[in-house]
Image (tube, rainbow, N blue to C red):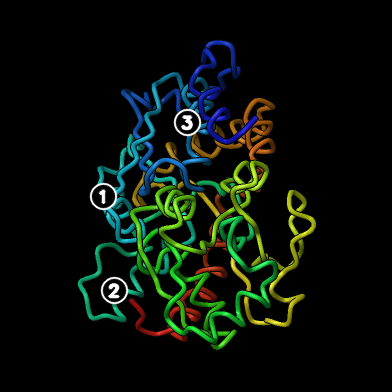
Amino acid sequence: MNRREILQAAAAVPLANLFTPFISPACAQSAWPSRNITMIVPFPAGGQADLAARPVAMALERILGKPVIVDNRAGGAGGSVGNAQAARAEPDGHTLLMTLSSLAVLPEADRLFDRPVSYEVSQFAPIARVLADPTLLAVPAAAPWKTLRDFVDDARKRPGEIPYGSSGPYGTLHVAMEMFAASAGIKLLHVPFRGAGPALTALLSNTVQAVASAPGTLRQQVDDGKMRVLANWGAARVPSFPEVPTFQELGYKDVEFYIWAGLFAQSTLPAPIMTRLREAMAQAVTAPEVTKMFAAAGSPVAYLDAPEFAKFVETDSARLIAAVKKIGKVE
């Protein structure tokens, strides 16, 4: 089952056949949710946030008893537009945000360029981490580079000529590639798109020659012989790509990056609704139908409840912000 089939299957499963609802005392007293829930995904369909959102939304719809609508707000800016829209939404539990690790990076990038900051991380409350995958470096199968060494050697001969795609300036894919480029002492040509999905499409059409992406968005393309994976940004090899070495194995000790996807609400969300959301997410991510979909896509569930997720976000964000400051201003 490829990624497209997984998402189609998620949309086709009758919700009544899925999960047993659970009503907590806190939720019963608050009458929440009282209408449809919107789950903002600040990227186009086809990327890691979208992969995380759709099975989870399907599960939450049955658990909470109201439609949960995935809203891909692909306004560009690495996800900043959609993140800001979620931050400004009414904190009543009817607008949620499924976003990526770039959540904390984007405000810092605005400050780096002396731009108005569109939102602050403090406006959000973490609910649950859903996925956390190390990023992989993919190139077209027809590209001349068989190894990362080949890629680096060629880039050194042609500084600024090898184009790579990203989900937008200082988004997850951009930071990962610039982290690698800085460590390798090479200069690549950044070509930003409105999300990971369009960036991957550009790679398939040879508009760009490299992209950093999560395993779940690459597996089918690699199996179909359309892409080749050269290296892995994680600290360990990925089970779904066991033959792909890590950057650290290849001598780039300071190159480590993960694309995690998690659900957030506004920081002023009432405590009873937050409790109910946490309970619902704990059920959703452990439901067999959901875990099977993620596993088939090559992105197994990496669930963390709100307290642990908040600590994870704080630690990971500090590391990424330091990386952005080290990279500096890049276009």
Q: Which mark is residue 152?
A: none
Q: Which residue is mark 1?
A: 85
In the image: residue 134, left or right of residue 97: right
Q: Nearer the viewer, residue 204 or 44?
A: 204
Element type where label 3 sits in the image: helix
> Which quadrant would the N terminus be assigned to in this image?
top right
Q: Which residue is mark 2?
A: 110
Q: Amino acid at mark 3?
A: Ala
Query: How crowded is the residue under tag 3: few (<14 C-alpha within 10 Å), some, or many (20+)?
Result: many
**Of callouts 1 and 3, which one flags the residue occurring earlier in the amino acid sequence?**
3
Element type where label 2 sits in the image: helix
In the image: residue 32, left or right of residue 314: left
Q: Residue at x 76, y 61 (%)?
A: 237
Q: Nearer the viewer, residue 307 or 76?
A: 76
- Please say if 159 is above or below 50: below
Q: Amino acid at mark 1?
A: Gln
C-alpha distance separating marks 1 and 3? 19 Å
Q: Residue at x 49, y 60 (%)?
A: 101
Q: Which residue is mark 3?
A: 57
- Tell how many labels: 3
In the image: residue 155, left or right of residue 30: right
Q: Nearer the viewer, residue 75 or 154?
A: 154
